[in-house]
Image (spheres, grey):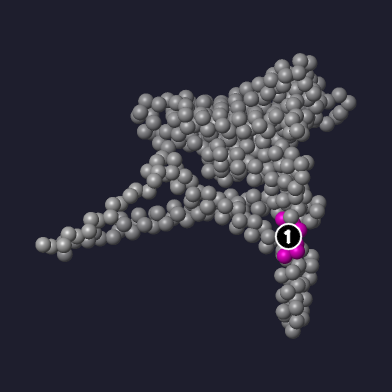
Amino acid sequence: MTAMSPAPEAIVPEPDADKPEVRDLRSWLPTVRDTLLAILLALAVGAFLIAISDDEVIEAIGNLFTYPGSFFIYAGDILRYSGQAIWEAYSALVDGAVGSGSSLQRTLERSAPLICAGLAVTIAFRAGLFNIGATGQMLVGALAAGYVGFTYDLPPGVHLVAAVTAGVLAGALWGGIVGVLKAQTGAHEVITTIMLNQVARFTVLYFLAKDAFQRPGSDNLLSPAVADNATYPTLFGLHLGIPLALVAAVGVWWLLERSRLGFEMRAVGANPDASRTAGMSISKVYISTMAIAGLLSGLAVTMILLGLQQSVTDQVVGSVGFDAITVALLGRATPLGTVLAGLLFGALSAGGLGMQTSAGVPPELIQVVQALIVLFVAAPALIRGLARIRRRKKTATAEPKGAAA
C-alpha cells in the first residue's frame, strides 16, 4: 500500500478581508500616509527657514567661514542655535494653537469659516467644477447678513435665524449665477468666479457708501456692528457657529454619498458625457452645485460676522475665500478631509500669532508652510501620474512576445 499524502492545508481567508469597510480603509491608508508625510516635509522645510533666519545662526555661519580653524566649534554653535530657534518657534506655534483655553478657542473660531468655505470648494470639485469664487460669495453673504443684523430689531433667536438665512441665500444666489452661466452659455467657472469676486467687492463698497450701510459718525466705508440679538450664542466660550460647521460637513457628506443629487454630482464630475447619455440633466447639476457652494460660503461668512460680531467691510472675509481652496485640496475633496484640513489651517493661523509674538518669527512663514503642505500633497500624485504615463508608453511601444519574425 502506498502511503497517503497528507491533505493540503486549507486556505483560510483573512477575516473581514473582503468587506467593503476594510477595502475602503485600505484605500484610505496611502492617502493618509501621503498627507502626513506632506505635513512633516513642510514643517521640516519651515524648520530650515527658521534656522537660517535666526540672527545667532547667521552670525555662527559667518564665523565658520571667517575662522575655518575653529570649524567644529562654530559648527556646533550652528546646530545648537538652530535647534534652539526651531524649538522656540514650534513650541510657540503649538502653544498659540492649543496651549490654553483661549488659544484653542481662537483656533476653532478660525477653523469654522475655513471648514464651511472649504466645503463650498469641495462640493464643486466633486461635480467637476473649480469654485474660486468663495470670496465673492462670502462678501455678498456678509452684505446681506450684516444688513439684517444691524438694521432690524427682532427678538433673540429670530434675529439670528433671519441674518443667517439672508447670508446663505445671498451666497447661494451669487454662486447660482456661476452655475447658470456654466450651464446655459458654457462659460468657464474659473473665469466667471474670478470676475464675480471683483464684482462682489465693488458691490460691497458701493453699498457701504450709502447711508443705510454707513456707520454713524464715521467717514470710513464701514457698517455698524451687528446687533447682539443677531450674533451666535456662546457655550463654554465658543459660539455655536463652530458646531454648525461640523453639522454642515455631515450634511455635505450625506448629500454626496446618500442622496440622488449627490450621486448625479459625482457622476457628472467623473464623466459628464456618460452622465448626459444616462439621462442626467447636466445643467441642473451645475446650477444646483454652485448654488449649494454659494450657500456654504454664505454660511462661512456668518461665522465671522455674526460669530465675532464684526462690521461689514470689503476686507471682512480676509484670505478665507482663497485659503478654502487650499483646505479643499489638502482634504482631498472629501467632507472629513476638509474638516481636518480646516482644523489644521486654523491651528496654523492661530499659532502663527504666537510664533510672531513669542519667538519673533515672521508671520509670512506660516503662509510658506501652508503652501508647502499643498505642494507636497500634490507632488506624490504628480509623480504617480507621470509613472503611469511612462508605463503606458512602454506598454504601447513594446513589441508583443511571440510576434512573427
The residue singled out by tag 1 in the image is 87
* Residue bounds of the magenta highlight: 83-90
In this view, which residue lies farthest toward the left? 1
Dominant secondary structure (helix, strand or loop) of the stretch shown in magenta: helix
**Label 1 amino acid?**
Trp
**Rendered location of residue 310, percent (x, y):** 78, 31
**With 47 as the anchor, is 176 left or right in this view?**
left
**Rendered location of residue 338, percent (x, y):** 58, 40
87 drawn magenta = yes
Q: Nearer the viewer, residue 143 or 253?
A: 253
Q: Residue at x 48, y 51 (%)?
A: 30
User: Which corner quadrant of the image does residue 397 belong to?
Assistant: bottom left
**With 118 as the anchor, is 273 left or right in this view?**
left
Q: Residue at x 43, y 44 (%)?
A: 22
Q: Residue at x 53, y 43 (%)?
A: 332
Tell me the quarter of the image containing the C terminus: bottom left
Q: Residue at x 56, y 42 (%)?
A: 337
Q: Nearer the viewer, residue 377 or 132?
A: 377
Category of crowding for the residue at label 1, using alpha-carbon neighbours closer than 10 angstroms: few (below 14), some (14–19), many (at least 20): some
**Rendered location of residue 329, percent (x, y):** 56, 44
103 drawn magenta = no
In this view, which residue lies farthest toward the front? 1
